[in-house]
Amino acid sequence: MGNWVGVKKVAFVPVIHPNYDLPNSPQGAAWQQLILARIYSWPDAVRNLDVSLRNYIRTVSGGVADIQGEVRDFVTANIQDVPPSYFSSQLEQTLRNEGFDAAALVMNGGVGAGTSDQNGYWARFAMVEGVGVWAMELTHILCKYMDLYTNDKPNDLGSFDNMDCACGTHPTAYTKVQLGWLPPSAIVVAPPATSQYDLHSVGLAHRRAVPTRIAKTITPVPALT
């Protein structure tokens, strides 16, 4: 497993996907500019937040991680399901030679496109998907850090970590330690098997037993979708 400390250079490759793109999808140079905006400045007027990829990464990492994104030329795919590494033989060596740490295909299809090559170089996601999806798939390939959700959806814990929900919430303290965003000393190791902690006294009328490892500070942050 790697960490995400400092700037990671990522190539974003727009994919023209005839017969499978959503109607009225952005096209041409305007689309490339939209992808660039998704990376660097994507204001949400309702919540008065910048939900760009870069702002999300810098925010949740406490300024430890950053991203340098470059939008590349269009490519065209004529198959329905385009694997993340579909253009690797055509583009990957050039991108590596130019110093890119990873690459991502950007699609104009519907939600559910988010995926990546495990332990690979390529990710894939759609314009209509939120910043949580973009960040999750890039974390997979840049850090070799896998999903935290299970296949038992009814009993999955839900949105406790972006690597579980891809919903733009903060990662857990555990994930932040693994990615180099939080020092291990920020985690309290309780000596007994269980200990009593008042996690949020306003919401709890009594104390509860919690796992032996907890974060010193838990700061709720609105999800960025």
Image (spheres, helix red, strand yellow):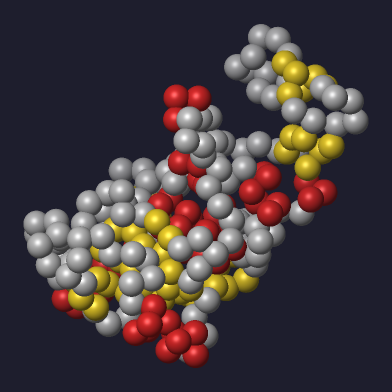
Drawn side of residue 30 relative to residue 45, left or right: left
Quadrant of the snapshot with the N terminus: bottom right
- Residue shown at 38% from the left, 82% from the top: 89
Q: Is residue 41 above or below residue 8?
A: above
Q: Is residue 43 visible?
A: no
Q: Compared with residue 195, is residue 144 higher up or lower down, i.e. above or below?
A: below
Left or right for 5, reference 87: right
Quadrant in the picture for residue 32: bottom left
At a point 62% along the width and 42% down the height, the residue shown is: 172
Q: Residue at x 79, y 30 (%)?
A: 212
**Image mark count:** 0
Residue 89 vertical placement versus 172 (above, below): below
Check the image and name the residue furthest to the right: 191
Horizontal side of 19 relative to 111 (left or right) equals left
Image coordinates of residue 136 in percent, x first then y, are: 47, 54
Q: Quadrant of residue 64?
A: bottom right
Q: Where does the image place residue 59, in percent across and percent down from the top left? A: 55, 55
Return the x and y of residue 210 as percentages of the image width and height.
73, 24
Q: In the figure, is residue 202 to the left or right of 154?
A: right
Residue 213 image offset from top left, x and y in percent: 77, 35
**The image quarter in which residue 216 lies:** top right
Residue 60: in sight, yes or no? yes
Q: Residue at x 22, y 51 (%)?
A: 110
